Image: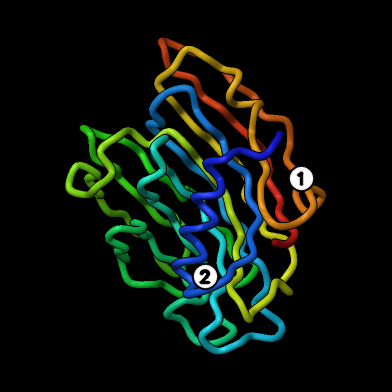
């Protein structure tokens, strides 16, 4: 669970999106083959206690190719939403940076189930919260139409706040994490990497479990908690 140079790229992307200096903390899985499915359940935290206008706070699950030239991510943050509110949107980053759908408001203590991406016929089907009020949504994203030409092989879970805002809204929790990759190797599932600007004790994760069937490795994690950037 040591640092990894690829994570520097992720943090740089997030700083650019926030228009300046950013503080971040996250967990990354570097799969041994192309990821074909990723899924998790988001537990929405309380809204910031001291919200700041035009100061971004957010957390997301995302995918990245091994050459680090793109990210596709499902974001919960305050960008495009009123001060002291959370919104959800899918996004492609960063050249170009594209908001794939309009932001939908989400609420503290709600559960966003089935947040994920699935590779079908070389296009990602990206879906929002299924069977969960107040909305459900999905979209198809074809990476062949964008600069990312290599398979998405890195999966990451990140919280981030941009200067001058700060993290004051408690734990961010992802549950029922599932990552599938086209590889017979299983060691990458347990070899997750933590990185960021804070001490490692801001995160806890249950023991990852991997199983390989017919050339596909499935990595499952019951819970991942990040308490601050």
Q: Residue at x 17, y 48 (%)?
A: 145
Depth check: 168 or 86 in front? 168
Q: Which residue is mark 1?
A: 204
Residue under label 2, please give it.
77
Q: Decide: is 134 above or below 60.
A: below
Nearer-the-camera pick, 172 or 188: 188
For label 2, the crowd category at 10 Å Cα-Cα, with few meaning under 14, some 14 to 19 and many 20 or more, is many
- Which corner quadrant holds the C terminus? bottom right
- Residue 199 as seen in the image, left or right of residue 51: right
Residue at the spot 55% in from the left edge and 87% down from the top edge: 83
Secondary element at image label 2: strand
Query: Residue at the left extreme?
Result: 145
Q: Are marks 1 and 2 in contact (CB under 8 Å)?
A: no
Image colouring: rainbow
Mark 1 and mark 2: span between their CA atoms?
22 Å
Q: Position of residue 203 (x, y in %)?
A: 75, 49
């Amino acid at each position: 669970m040591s640092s990894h140079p690829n994570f520097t790229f992720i943090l740089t992307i997030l700083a650019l999106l926030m228009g300046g200096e950013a503080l971040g903390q996250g967990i990354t899985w570097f799969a041994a083959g192309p990821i074909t499915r990723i899924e998790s359940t988001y537990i929405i935290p309380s809204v910031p206690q001291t919200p700041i206008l035009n100061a971004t706070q957010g957390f997301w699950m995302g995918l990245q190719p091994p050459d680090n030239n793109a990210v596709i991510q499902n974001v919960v943050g305050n960008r495009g939403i009123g001060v002291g509110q959370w919104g959800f949107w899918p996004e492609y980053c960063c050249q170009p940076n594209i908001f794939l759908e309009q932001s939908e408001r989400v609420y503290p203590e709600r559960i966003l189930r089935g947040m994920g991406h699935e590779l079908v016929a070389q296009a990602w089907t990206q879906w929002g919260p299924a069977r969960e009020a107040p909305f459900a949504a999905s979209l198809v994203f074809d990476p062949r139409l964008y600069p990312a030409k290599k398979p998405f092989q890195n999966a990451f879970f990140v919280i981030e706040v941009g200067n001058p805002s700060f993290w004051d809204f408690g734990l961010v929790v992802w549950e029922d994490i599932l990552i599938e990759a086209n590889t017979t190797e299983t060691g990458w599932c347990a070899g997750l990497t933590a990185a960021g600007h804070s001490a490692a004790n801001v995160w806890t994760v249950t023991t990852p479990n991997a199983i390989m069937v017919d050339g596909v490795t499935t990595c499952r994690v019951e819970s991942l908690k990040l308490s601050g950037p």
